Amino acid sequence: MSAPQAPDVAAELREILARATGRDELLGVSEQTPLFGDGVGLDSLTGTLLLREVHRRFGVDVAAEDLNLDALATLATLAAFITEHAPARPAPGP
Amino acid sequence: MTVKCVIWDLDNTLLAGVYLESGSQPPPPEPVMLGAAATLRGRGIIHAIASRNPPEAADYAAQATGLDFAAAECGWDRKSDAVRRIIADLDLSPDAMAFVDDDPYERAEVSFEVPQVLVLSPEDMAEAVGWPEFSPPAVTAEARRRGEMYAERRRREREARAFAGSRDEFLRTCGTEVTIAPAAAADAPRLHELSVRTHQFNTSGEPVAEAELHRLIGSAEHQVTTVRLRDKFGDDGLVGGCVTRAGQDGTWTVTLLMMSCRAMGRGVIEALLAWLTGSAARGGARALAVPCLISPRNVPLRLALAAAGFRAVDGSPTPVFSRPLSGPRPEVPGWVTVRPGPPEPGPAGR
């Protein structure tokens, strides 16, 4: 068993974001780009899709543990929150 | 909990016969069930189909019954899976659903797998029209049009899937118009209904009686605001509202904020929050506060509050999310046109 690593998590988050928003260019978004506002433009719909998918894939319920959703500041803060709160998941096979 | 959606089996339930066993002439609607369905539509209850038939059966049923179906699941997998997909697709709660099927096995399977769903035989359904579960308190213009609005939503979503560009670009082509205006007495029934029906975008989680809404609309200390939504696909009518009170301490408090989940993802809540902060700032307030119950269901509202720069201090079941009004304020998404409503009545202004 091993905890997920932040760089892998960030890559997976880019995929989720691109799918939730229909914007393929988010596959290349920087880890420091703000998720709300001018950066990614996360709104209540795309944000909900993102949080549901994070809960499903990583077992982390961000909304339950982070009142102000500060974890959603940037891709980097979200990836860090996930690696910190994720239950260990099985290591990849040989 | 009152039922918001009835999921119908077709063969020997909504149709008087078996679709695939009837040759070139499919069976007509079963008159008692059709009567029940039409009565429920008049009360704002929507309909859906879960049938072991090819997808054409749903198109036939819509045409033969004249009903709008908000969702249709035709196929040969388990009925409980079809019911679950419809619940997810319509974004309703399982205890807001009824399922009608003539087959006792299907009824037992759905009851077992999704126990919150009210499961009925056609005989039960004929009688259930008179039950309180099927009698929502307020029947508003929005409620009567609900089935049609879901059909419009399906057209909007079909076109969105076929659209080559991003979601924002699609929304830009939809001509979304949000109208924000002071509430009139005639809006009270619909605002009451929103207080009962909305969960994902609701700060209080408590129904507000019509009499209380009338009092708030007439009160000089409160401002009751309505939000209407339309685009090229259709007019969703009154989709949201809020109640604001200006405090002596320079803080305006939004004592209730609610929006239909039908308006989710179309820039409406963002437009309302941007308008509220602008309006409070113009009214001389220094801060805007939104007390908000924390529940797993209203996470979308918390996302909207976070995106608009609101923050709360932990430690209460209803934390107060607030933001200062100096500096940059939240913006209305580029695809939304906000129309001001009619001017404020009364000498005091707001």
Image (spheres, rainbow, N blue to C red):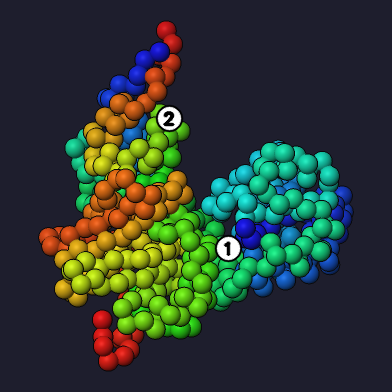
Relative to A83, residue B106 above or below:
below
x, y percent for residue A58: 40, 29
Question: In the picture, residue B85 is in which quadrant?
Answer: top right
Q: In the image shown, does B166 or A75 lie closer to the viewer?
A: A75
Relative to A79, residue B103 above or below:
below
Residue A51 visible at all? yes
Q: In the image shown, does B51 or B311 lie closer to the viewer?
A: B311
Which chain contains the residue that carries disc 2? A
Q: What separation in Å lies between label 2 and label 1 (alpha carbons)?
A: 35 Å
Report helix, strand or loop for mark 1. Answer: helix
Could you tell me which residue is drawn at 23 percent across and 60 percent down? B330
User: Disc 1 designates what residue?
Assistant: B151
Give the left or right position of residue B53, taking residue B141 as reference.
Answer: right
Q: Nearer the viewer, mark 2 or mark 1?
A: 2
> How would you rate the neighbour count of disc 2 (Cα within 10 Å): few for under 14, some for 14-19, many for 20 or more?
some
Could you tell me which residue is drawn at 54 percent across and 72 percent down? B142
Give the left or right position of residue B247, taking residue B22 as reference.
Answer: left
Q: Residue flagged by tag 1: what amino acid is it?
A: Ala
Report helix, strand or loop for mark 2. Answer: loop
Q: In the image shown, does B323 or B76 lie closer to the viewer?
A: B323
Give the left or right position of residue B315, taking residue B263 as reference.
Answer: left
In the rendering, which numbered label is found on residue A59?
2
Which chain contains the residue that carries disc 1? B
Q: In the image shown, does B68 or A5 lie closer to the viewer?
A: A5
x, y percent for residue B211: 50, 78
Question: In the picture, residue B324 is in which quadrant?
Answer: bottom left
x, y percent for residue B104: 84, 44
